[in-house]
Image (cartoon, rainbow, N blue to C red):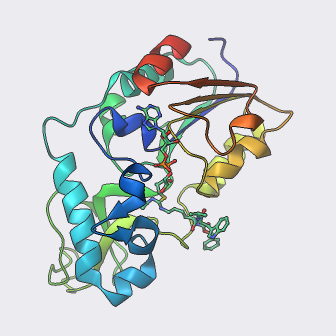
Amino acid sequence: MSAPPLIVLTGAGISAESGLATFRDNNGLWERHRVEEVATPEAFAADPALVHRFYNARRAQLADPAIQPNAAHRALGQLFANWKAPALLVTQNVDDLHDRAMPGSDALLHMHGELKKVRCTACGQRRAWAGDLSTGTPCPACGATGMLRPDIVWFGEMPLGMDRIEDALQDCRLFLSIGTSGQVYPAAGFVAALRGRAERIELNLEPSLGSHLFEEARHGPATLLVPKRVE
Ligand code: BV8
């Protein structure tokens, strides 16, 4: 691939073949709750134990050695290692599979936060967190209990890194959207924002909601499409 300013956007579909369920799997339900209802500040205020259980289960799954970056994550790691122009990988995913495929890369931005981080709502400190979290867990920095939350952007909360993303969108001339259904904003709006300024390519198992907006759309599993398209 030539090297214009690049943005890659990924969603849950890029981690599906690593064994992590997407949001649309089992009809977007978890323990009979709609994910959109659990991943909210209101749900956390109303029933913190339920929301902690939701994230503890997903954090524990990520600790399973069977869950590893797949060929799509690795192909993107290679692409970013060799790209000779500005490049930003914006992921909607809260797993750490991109991080493991491109360790230490400054080009990776988790716009919806990270499962393996927690934030103290008393002192604001963020820190890595691999185990379970409960309402009784004290903040290691300030000692306050009941104030730690997953460092995740919930529905209704401002995504992270939006200034950096907006700047990158201004210069972007090549946009690759991988494994996302195009249902969650503001991420789902990037493709329209780039109309007439960037070549836009979708690589997804099936057409996303915004598929018709892309100059090129290929459908199939990410582990087949991504290495072929970026190598
Ligand atoms: C905000 C962390 C403003 C949580 C997440 C009405 C209309 C429009 C917008 C809204 C509206 N009402 C509210 C909104 C805004 C809302 C929104 O967009 N809601 C949607 C549901 C309508 N957005 C927000 O609230 C955002 N914030 O707008 O803030 C603001 C302004 C000022 C001040 C304050 C606030 C915040 C959204 C972030 C929510 N958090 N994640 C957690 O993970 O628990 S979103 C979460 O869901 C994911 O991170 C991800 O982004 C999203 C799911 O999307 P996908 O990643 O696309 O996953 P999905 O399962 O949908 O699709 C997977 C795709 O992969 C499928 O297409 C499938 O075909 C494909 N696939 C499957 N297998 C494979 C594959 N592809 C390739 N290979 C395979 N093997």
**Residue 129 seen in this snapshot:** no
Residue at image coords 40%, 22%? 223
In the image, taking residue 149 as reference, residue 223 lies left or right, namely: right
Q: Position of residue 85 (x, y in %)?
A: 63, 22
Residue 125 quadrant: bottom left
Nearer-the-camera pick, 217 or 79: 217
In the image, taking residue 106 as reference, residue 100 lies left or right, namely: left
**Residue 146 seen in this snapshot:** yes
Total numbered labels: 0
**Residue sitting at the far right:** 196
Residue at image coords 21%, 77%? 139
Q: Position of residue 158 (x, y in %)?
A: 57, 68
In the image, taking residue 213 as reference, residue 30 lies left or right, namely: left
Residue at image coords 16%, 80%? 138
In the image, taking residue 128 as reference, residue 26 lies left or right, namely: right
Residue 28 in the image: above or below residue 93: below
Residue 16 in the image: above or below residue 127: above
Q: Position of residue 145 (x, y in %)?
A: 20, 86
Residue at image coords 50%, 31%? 205
Which image quadrant: the N terminus? top right
Q: Position of residue 31 (x, y in %)?
A: 27, 68
Residue 182 in the image: above or below residue 134: above
